[in-house]
Amino acid sequence: MEKKIKKNSFAESTFISYFAIVASKVLGVVYNIPFYALIGNAGGFIYSIAYQIYALFLDISTSGIPTAISIVVGHYNSLKKYATKEKAYQIGIKAILFMSIISFLIMQIGAEAIARFYLSSMKQGATIADIAMAIRIISICVLVVPLLSIRRGYLQGHKFFEISSFSQIIEQLIRIIVALGGSYLIIKVFQRHVKYGVYIALLGASIGAIFAYLYVSKRIKNNKSSFPMGEKDEIVDNSKDIALKILGYCATITLVSIASSVYNIVDTKLMLEGLKNVGYSDIDNQHISSLISSWVPRMTEVMGALALAMTSSIAPHISDSFARNDLKDVSNKINKGISILMLITIPMMIGMFVFAEPYFRIFYGYDKYGPSLFRINVVFNLIVCYTMVLSMSLQSLGKGRKVVFTTLLSIIVNMVLDLPLIYLLHYLGLPAYLGAGTSSIIAELLKLVLLLKYIHEAVDVSYNNSFEILKKEIIPLAAMSVVIVLLNIVLPPVESRLLLVLQLALYALCGMIVFLLLGLNNQMIYDVFGKDIVNKILSKLHLRR
């Protein structure tokens, strides 16, 4: 008999999602070390381009439906309109199936044209045929992942986060086993070109998604009683009204996601052209491009895991409070989300920024471009953590148009600044390849300011609580920074990768202890998580005062 699943509160769902995503991301980050060593720069470029295209068509095929279903299901559940909720879910499945098939066909047919767009006049490195084949293989994912995503959205709408979260770990584990095992056999045992190892790794993504889908489906089937279907005499909203409600949320999510994916593609193309114009070789150009678009961002995924967890958990909870017109609760949850982010992401950002070179070396070895690209990406991803959560919060308040406007404006600003900043940095004698990252930071900061403004206007949110937490965080952050910088001077990074991992772990542990002790002393930790939760954790650790 399977243990009955239970609903999760906002704090619980955030941490369940967070730890699952962290586990998944850590697995992915660790996997990158041997995988990149296997495929090298040449395979890395093919892999990164294929994933960029996949991200775009995944956005098209899902069309924001999983998140919309999460919000809509949560809304109808709070109103006890269970039959309408189930009808909305079925409408979502039909829509997502249609879009998935269309996306798959476009990727299959248009693979060569897409590859030609990237490579243009490049004569060295990856070929059009190499990239086209990678795109065709990864296209299988758009037939599986959207269906998996909508089932996760259905679970999250019911505030069941454990199954959805654990399925992410399953998906990642299977993907890594297939990718690493398959690529090793192809490249090292059968001595084939690295591109074939990349193809196996891309296929592994589909296999991982299939296993996760089967797991989620089985858990839903075995817990039918936890998903109320409604009574036969229940009045059900008509299909048109339900579809319009789903579409209302989908339109925003889809436009934002697709716009972001399109920008990433255009950004890569602009950077390839810009760096070529200032004298970078095709090989260096492709290497820098793959670092920026794929490999460097993977190193900061753990930092973004909290934001990803919070976006999945905050939507149904804010939607529920907003449906009950409890604006005070909406304000509390938004401030709580910002405060938790500040408490975790800012210390992580400082540590990654200070130890960028040794941290990068653990993953990909010595690289003249890597550490500086990583520092830029760390700052950018810190800002993205907040814009992700705030965008979803604003979307859950029914202000989707504002989200679309801020996203499109930031993308336009980013695109406009890309080439000028590349040329400006080159003219000033600075690394031109940092131009694209600098433009992204400027655009994302603009987006952050606008989102804070629009949320305040929508529900009269006061950010005083978040600012108080930020002020209390300054001294713990300063003390932590001093400690890790002194450790870096006294115990400079070693050459051995294995010892370097242990050394950075020691730095992180010492910095974390200092930060937490000062945070407990000035009540910052208690203010964010509440005294009951903190004291309970301290008691279990035998640290309660």
Image: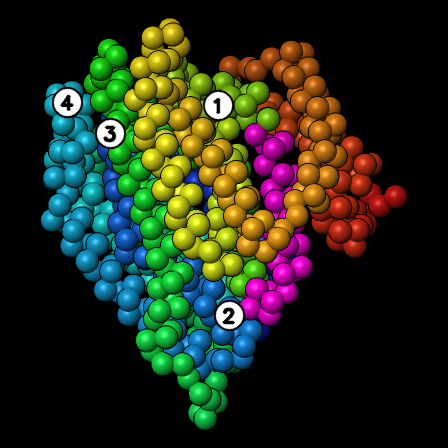
CA separation in Å, label 4 and label 1: 29 Å
Q: Badge 4 is on which residue?
A: 122
Of circles 3 and 4, the one toward us is 3
Q: Amino acid at mark 3?
A: Lys
Q: Badge 1 is on which residue?
A: 375
Rendered image quadrant of residue 510: top right
Of circles 1 and 3, the one toward us is 3
Please provide percent x and percent y for residue 5: 56, 70
Q: Badge 2 is on which residue?
A: 75
- Check residue 269 in the rendering and tell me which mark sits there, or answer none: 3
Please check the rendered image and state whether residue 345 is part of the magenta-colored stretch, yes or no: yes
Does residue 277 lie above or below 473 as drawn?
above
The boundaries of the magenta stretch are: 320-349
Does residue 83 lie above or below 259 as drawn?
below
Residue 510 visible here: no
Q: Amino acid at mark 1?
A: Arg
Task: Check disc 1 and report its element: helix, strand or loop.
Answer: helix
User: Which of the two discs, 3 and 4, labels the residue nearer the N terminus?
Assistant: 4
Q: Is residue 212 left or right of residue 330?
A: left
Which residue sits at x=51%, y=28%?
379
User: Which of the two discs, 3 and 2, labels the residue nearer the N terminus?
Assistant: 2
CA separation in Å, label 1 and label 3: 22 Å
User: Which of the two discs, 4 and 1, labels the residue nearer the N terminus?
Assistant: 4
CA separation in Å, label 1 and label 2: 41 Å
Which residue sits at x=44%, y=50%?
402
Residue 447 visible here: yes
Task: Check disc 4 and report its element: helix, strand or loop.
Answer: loop
